Image (cartoon, rainbow, N blue to C red):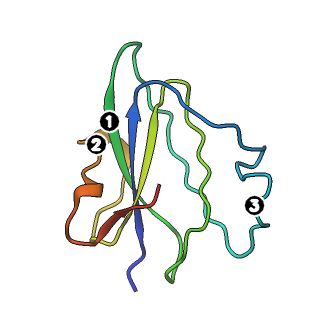
Amino acid sequence: MRRSIIAGSLCLLFACGGTPDGDGAPADAPELIGERFALDYGPVTIQPGQEGTRCIWMRLSNETPIKVRQMHNVLSSSSHHLIVYKDDMDTTEQLTPVDCEPFTGALNSTGMIAPIM
């Protein structure tokens, strides 16, 4: 079975954020069970006043389908959005951030790409 690939779009604008507890989960969230996956990339350098969208395509290490029940992200002070897609297309992994169009995965009509965050 083909592994899922996560496509992330990072809109580099201005920082926004909430106030979750230390592990990123709400205080009343149930304890996490099962296997955990971690993705990490960056840093992405942006000049003051610069604005743009950068994308990467990164494979998870799962051998079978998974259900994503929680995500935690940490953005730099120059970031505004992190958009994560489940991408079932036969996409080549691209770990170096590249310029791309924002939100195109959300507009994909094949059903093979869907936003999850």
The foreground one among 61 and 6 is: 6
The foreground one among 111 and 38 is: 111
Is the residue marked by circle 2 packed among few (<14), some (14-19), or many (20+) residues within 10 Å?
some
Disc 2 marks which residue?
A: 102
Q: Amino acid at mark 3?
A: Ala
For numbered disc 2, what is the local secondary structure?
A: loop
Disc 3 marks which residue?
A: 29
The mark nearer the N terminus, 2 or 1, is: 1
Q: Residue at x 62, y 51 (%)?
A: 72
Q: Nearer the viewer, mark 1 or mark 3?
A: 3
Is the residue marked by circle 1 packed among few (<14), some (14-19), or many (20+) residues within 10 Å?
some
Q: Are marks 2 and 1 in contact (CB under 8 Å)?
A: yes
x and y percentages locating residue 7 in the rendered image: 38, 56
x and y percentages locating residue 23 in the rendered image: 75, 49
Is the residue marked by circle 3 packed among few (<14), some (14-19), or many (20+) residues within 10 Å?
few
Disc 1 marks which residue?
A: 53
Residue 11 falls in which quadrant of the image?
top left
The foreground one among 109 and 6 is: 109
Left or right of 59 in this view: 20: right
Which residue reaches farthest bottom?
1
Q: Amino acid at mark 1?
A: Thr
